[in-house]
Amino acid sequence: MAQRVVVDPVTRIEGHLRVDCEVDGGKVTKAWASGQMWRGIELILQGKDPRDAWVFAQRICGVCTTVHAITSVRAVENALKLEVPLNAQYIRNMIQGAHNVHDHIVHFYHLSALDFVDIVSALKADPAATAKLAQSISGWPRNSTQEFATAQKKLQAFINSGQLGIFGSGYWGHPAMKLTPEANLMAAAHYLQALDYQRRMNKVVAILGSKTPHIQNMAVGGVTNPINMDSQSTLTLEKLMYIKQLIDEVGDFITQVYIPDVAAIGAFYADWTQYGRGVVNYLSIPDMPLDTKGTVFALPAGYIDGGDLAKFTPIKDFHDPYFEKGVKESVKHSWYQGGKGPLHPYDGETIPNFTDWQDDGKYSWIKSPTFYDKRAQVGPLANVLGMYASGHQRTQFWVNAVLDAVSGHLGSKVGVDALHSTIGRHAARAVRCVVLHEELQNQWTLLMENIAKGDTKTFNKPVFPKGEIRGFGFHEAPRGMLSHWVVIENGKIKNYQAVVPTTWNAGPRDEDGNISAYEAALLDNPVAVADQPLEIIRTLHSFDPCLACAVHLTDTETKSHYQVKVV
C-alpha cells in the first residue's frame, strides 16, 4: 500500500522547498515539488528605472546574488542593443567565474556530501589507513596521517560538546550509507579544508564586486570599476595580482581533491547512476562573452532533445531568436491567477492567488517553464552536456578524465550515459568547476592584455528611447540557465519576469500535466526507511535547489517562521 512521505522543508538548500512523495514497495511512485514562498520581485520592479533593476533583482537570492545582477543588466542592455566595453565583459566574467567555482565547492562539500558521508562512522577510522587510501587516489599534500588525525579530533570535539551544529541532522547509520570509516574520514577532512578554499574564491568576487553577497559594481553599460594603475582607489596592478594569486591557490584543490573525491564517491555509489534520470531535455546557454556585442563566447551551449547529444541545437548569442521565442511559463498548477494558458515572459503575469495544497490542482508558488512546449532540465549537467556536445575541448577532456577515474575504481567502463543520474549531476558539477577555473585564469590574462594595450574603458552610457522596447538577458548560473525579461516603456519598467534555474527544475506540473525535473527524477527512487528519507534528499540535493530568499512567509497568528516536519 502506498505511503505518503512529506519532506518539509528540504534542508541544506536556499529557500523553502516541500516535496511530497508516494512510496510503494520501497520506491517513489509519484512526486510533487512545491516552492513554499512567494518571490514578488517582479511586482516591486514595475515602474522602476531600468538602470536600478539589477540592485533589486539580485535581492531575489542571498546565495546566487551576482547572477541576478549580471543577468538583469544584460536584459536591459539587450533591449537597448547596447554594447559593453571589453574590460567590463572580462571583469563580469571573472566575477561570475569566481562565484560559480565558490558555489560548486560549497555545494558538493557543505550542502550535499553529508548525504553520502557518515560523520559518526568517521570517528572509527584509522587516520593512517585513511592517509593510505587518500594517497592512492590523489597526490594532494594534505592527505597525511596528521591531517586526518586532526580532522578526527575536531569531529570528536563536536560530539563531546553536545552541540553538533552543522552535523546535527544527518541520518547517521542509515542503511543507504556505504562508505568505509576511512573513506568517511577522508571526505570529512576535505569538507573542513573546503571551507578555506571556497572562501579564497569568494574573495575574488568581493574585490571585483566591492562586496559579497550582493555585489555593488554592476551598471547597465558595463561596470563601475575604474582602471588606473596609479590610484589605490581603483582597480590597480596590485589588486589584480592578488586576484591571480587567489585564483591559482584554488586550482590544486579542485584537481587534486574535488575531482578525485567525486570520482571516488561515484564509484562507491555506482548504483546511483541508475537513479535520478528524470527529464533529459537539457537547456543551457553560452557564457563568458569575448566581444562587446555578446556574439562570441568562451563557453558554448544549447539545447539537447531527449538526452541525445547528437540532437544538439546551439544557442548562438545574446540576441538569439531561437532562445527568445522558445520560453513560456504556465501557472495552471501554481498559486497565481491565470487562465490564459502558458505565457511568454514578456507577457508574463505574477498575480498571487493562494488556494491551499491541491494534489491535482495548484500546489506551488513556482511557475512551470517550458522550452518549445517541453519540460527541460537546467544546471551543471545540462551545461556540461551542452559544452560536450558542442565540441568544447576542455569539457570533453575533463568529462573523460572523471569517467576514466570512476572506471578505474570500478574495474569496468563507465560511459557518458551514466551522467544522466543523481550521482552524474555531482560529477558534472565537478567538471564544470574545473572548466570554469581554467577559464577564470584565461579571463584574467585577457583583461591584463587588454589593459596593456592602453584600453581602460569600463562603461558605455545607456540612453533610453521613447516608446516600448523589450529585452532578455541570460547567464549560466551555478544552478543552471537563468534569464530575465524586461519590457520598458518611456524609460520605465512596464513588466519584468525572472525565469530562474529552480523554476525550470522544481516547477509543478505544466499546462498539459507534464512533471518537472525534480518530480521526474524522484520516480523509482529507493526509500529504505520511510521516516528517514535520505535517498529522496540525495536526489533533490544533486540539483542544488535554490528557492529564492527575497520574501519569507510568516504565520501572523502563531508567529511561526518555519516548521520542520518529516512524516
Image (cartoon, grey):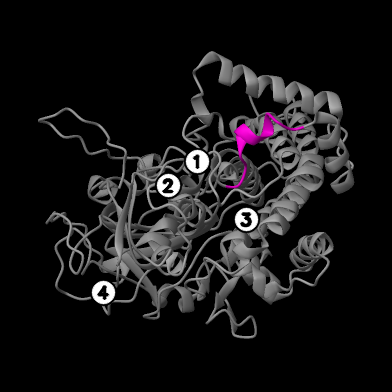
Given contact means CB atoms under 8 Å apart, are the residues at marks 4 and 1 in contact? Answer: no
Q: Are marks 3 and 2 in contact (CB under 8 Å)?
A: no
Tell me, yes or no, whether the two marked residues, 4 and 2, touch with CB atoms within 8 Å.
no
The residue sitting at 23% across, 66% down in the picture is 331
Q: What's the amino acid at mark 4?
A: Pro
**Label 1 or label 2, whichever comes before in sequence order:** 1
Find residue 522 and name its label. Answer: none
Numbered disc in front, either 4 or 1: 1
| Cα distance between the residues tagged 4 and 2 | 37 Å
Which mark lies nearer to you, 3 or 2? 2
Q: Is disc 1 surrounded by few (<14), some (14 to 19) or many (20+) residues within 10 Å?
A: many
Furthest-top residue in view?
161
How far separated are the C-alphas under marks 3 and 2? 22 Å
Q: State the image quarter where residue 416 is shown.
A: bottom right
* Helix, strand or loop: magenta stretch: loop
As measured in the structure, the alpha-carbon distance from the residue carrying label 1 to the one carrying label 3 is 20 Å
Where residue 356 appears, as percent x and y from the top left, is 14, 54
The image shows residue 352 at horizontal and vertical percentages of: 16, 54
Q: Amino acid at mark 3?
A: His
Left of 49 or right of it: where is 130?
Answer: right
Look at the picture and state if 168 lies above or below 50: above
Q: Amino acid at mark 2?
A: Gln
Residue 342 - label = 4
The residues bearing labels 4 and 1 have C-alpha atoms spaced at a distance of 41 Å
Question: The magenta stretch spans which residues?
Answer: 116-125
| Residue 128 position within the rendered picture, expressed as x and y whole percent measured from the top left | 86, 31
Tell me, yes or no, whether the two marked residues, 4 and 3, touch with CB atoms within 8 Å.
no
Left/right placement of residue 530 relative to residue 145 reads: left
Residue on which the image places disc 1: 171
Indicate which disc residue 532 carries: 2
The residue located at (46%, 34%) in the rendering is: 169
